Image: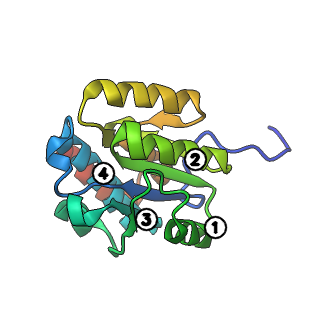
């Protein structure tokens, strides 16, 4: 084993936070595979709530795009979105303050649109030293090509592309616990 500090290749519940980007009422109906993406984001939000993992939510111009969709809001312990007009959430003062207050070094980033707000946020987070995990099944764009190119670009920019289920099992780390049993029931229902 290495003795020098090196970031883990796995998501850690102690080191990570979930950031849900712009999953809004007027935007989601136009998103490719929107229902499946929402289901995976709901899984992540619900699991984060059960495990005590902090969650930050952003909303891009809610006056025009609406609020975060109800199913995601219902899965959250609290709903207090960071409102933004910037595409990347990183330079937004309210986001920076909340992120800084968490003391986390990893982020699980989920939301839309992959090629705009997600890519800019992910690459900006990597640039400031945050380890970014992006579940590919919890992000999309209006056009599949935009999503696919964005995932490729983020991966080449240092983002770890994964899946929502992989993140959940890395947060859990072991079977046989009450937490595992609760999450397993949800996964079975989604299958």
- Kindly check if marks 2 and 3 are in contact, taking CB atoms under 8 A apart as contact: no
Q: CA distance from mark 2 to mark 4?
A: 21 Å
- Kindly check if marks 4 and 3 are in contact, taking CB atoms under 8 A apart as contact: no
Residue pointed to by mark 4: 41
Residue pointed to by mark 2: 124
Q: What secondary structure is marked by label 2?
A: helix
Residue found 65% across the figure and 45% down from its top? 127
Q: Is residue 136 left or right of residue 108?
A: left
Residue found 45% across the figure and 69% down from its top? 52
Q: CA distance from mark 4 to mark 3?
A: 12 Å
- Kindly check if marks 4 and 1 are in contact, taking CB atoms under 8 A apart as contact: no
- The residue nearer to you, when weighing 55 against 125, is 125
Q: CA distance from mark 3 to mark 1?
A: 13 Å
State which tag comes first along the sequence, 2 or 1.
Answer: 1
State which tag comes first along the sequence, 3 or 1.
Answer: 3
Q: CA distance from mark 2 to mark 1?
A: 17 Å
Residue pointed to by mark 3: 55
Query: Which of the numbered marks, if any, corresponds to residue 103?
Result: 1
**Crowd around label 4: few <14 · some 14–19 · many ≥20 (10 Å):** many
């Amino acid at each position: 084993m290495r003795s020098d500090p090196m970031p883990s290749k796995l998501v850690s519940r102690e080191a990570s936070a979930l950031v849900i980007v712009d999953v809004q009422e007027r935007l989601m109906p136009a998103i490719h595979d929107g229902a499946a993406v929402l289901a995976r984001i709901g899984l992540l939000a619900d699991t984060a709530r059960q495990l005590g993992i902090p969650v930050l939510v952003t909303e891009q111009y809610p006056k025009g795009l609406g609020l975060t969709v109800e199913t995601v809001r219902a899965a959250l312990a609290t709903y207090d979105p960071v409102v933004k007009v910037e595409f990347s959430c990183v330079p937004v003062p309210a986001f920076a303050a909340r992120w800084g207050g968490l003391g986390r070094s990893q982020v699980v980033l989920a939301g839309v649109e992959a090629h705009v707000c997600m890519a800019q946020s992910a690459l900006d987070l990597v640039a400031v030293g945050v380890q970014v995990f992006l579940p590919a099944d919890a992000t999309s764009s209006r056009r599949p090509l935009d999503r696919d190119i964005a995932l490729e670009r983020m991966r080449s920019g240092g983002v770890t592309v994964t899946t929502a289920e992989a993140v959940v099992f890395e947060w859990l780390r072991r079977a046989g616990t009450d937490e595992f049993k609760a999450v397993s029931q949800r996964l079975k229902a989604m299958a």
